[in-house]
Image (cartoon, rainbow, N blue to C red):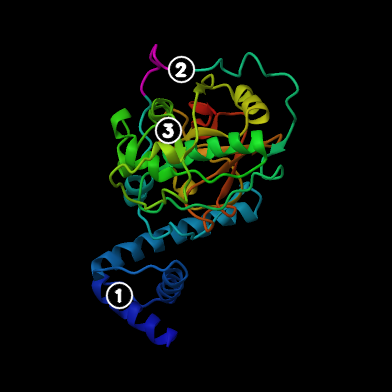
Amino acid sequence: MRLAAVSLLYFGLAGLSGLGQSDSGQAYMEQFAQFKEANNRSYIRAHDELRSYKAYEENHQIVEAHNKDYDSGRSSFRLAANTLADMSTDSYLKGFLRLLRSPPISASDNMVDIVGATLMDNVPDSLDWRKKGFATPSYNQQSCGSCYAFSIAQSIEGQVFKRTGRILSLSEQQIVDCSISHGNQGCTGGSLRNTLRYLQATGGLMRSVDYKYASKKGACQFVSELAVVNVTSWAILPANDENAIQAAVAHIGPVAVSINATPKTFQLYSDGIYDDVTCSSTSVNHAMLLIGYDKDYWILKNWWGEKWGESGYMRMRKGINLCGIANYAAYAIV
């Protein structure tokens, strides 16, 4: 049955695209069929499937070429035809990387003193909040550009865990639906600062079980009586100061960070210490949660499901502001 399906897929796509029936083409067709089944992919129109197949084939070739460098010791990380492998660069950028530029700090922002000058002592050489018990499930933002909501909500969950020892799952959907008045744009993007301003103004964040994630923007359904966490203040860490970020993770807890996730190697990351030097620090377009570090790398949690990276996590080279990780980092106080 699967062989018949693969044959139909192969001849159908070959007919649409004019692809030759080479051995390599046949192999990619079979792998694409397996990819669709493993990732529950379906396409409404034949041309959508053709476009996705072409992206998959190109991405698979990038994976194969890069992993030869890894196998020969010329790279410290591997790539994979992961759950994003059927996305072209354009589709990936428009669909997943929606972090907005944060507005300037205003006099009305209730910020605490930054950590850089106050908590630099007694910082351990390595730390992983998962090993301390803050091991939250893998999340998938799906087709909603809500990285800003996940990053801030989970950084607050880290604050709650640090204070109580309990993991309290908070509502990203509340942030997606309700922070429009503070400059966010639902599933088409938002910023860490806009999100912090919203939470400070509204006073509370509901549990995810009471306000479930829908991967699309809806009407605001916030009920103040059901809020379980109040944000009293927040802080932006010193720009380009990785020592301050390390101190914050050690003494404050997991922090939300802005990242440049543009490179194809980021999209297709599988495992290892990510150190693509083409990942510029001049601009950022994605938000992640920084949950730990070691001597040579940061540990980041992403929102693209457990099939991306190291079960939803990434290790990134430390000490060179790779991908702009130190450009804009923030945390809330509860």
| Of labels 2 and 3, the one closer to you | 2
Residue 62: x %, y % from top left = 47, 55
Instruction: Report the Cα–Cα distance between label 2 and label 3.
Output: 24 Å
The question of residue 107 being in magenta is answered with: yes
- Quadrant containing the N terminus in the rendered view: bottom left
Q: Quadrant of residue 21?
A: bottom left
- Looking at marks 3 and 1 on the same chain, the residue that comes earlier in the sequence is marked by 1
Helix or strand or loop: what does disc 2 sit on? loop
Whether label 2 touches label 1, CB < 8 Å: no
Choose between 184 and 280: the one closer to the eye. Answer: 184
Residue 238: x %, y % from top left = 54, 19
The question of residue 238 being in magenta is answered with: no
The residue that disc 2 covers is 110
Residue 331: x %, y % from top left = 53, 28
- Looking at marks 2 and 3 on the same chain, the residue that comes earlier in the sequence is marked by 2
| Residue positioned 49% across, 39% down in the render | 153
The residue that disc 1 covers is 14
Q: Quadrant of residue 118?
A: top right
The residue that disc 3 covers is 284
Q: Residues within 10 Å of mark 1 (few under 14, many from 20)?
A: some
Helix or strand or loop: what does disc 1 sit on? helix
Q: Amino acid at mark 1?
A: Ala
| Of labels 2 and 1, the one closer to you | 2
**Is 176 positioned to the left or the right of 27 in the image?**
left
Choose between 90 and 293: the one closer to the eye. Answer: 293
- Quadrant containing the C terminus in the rendered view: top right
Q: Look at the image and give the residue range highlighted in magenta.
A: 103-109
Q: Residues within 10 Å of mark 2 (few under 14, many from 20)?
A: some
Against 289, is 236 above or below? above
The residue furthest front is: 225
Choose between 221 and 36: the one closer to the eye. Answer: 221
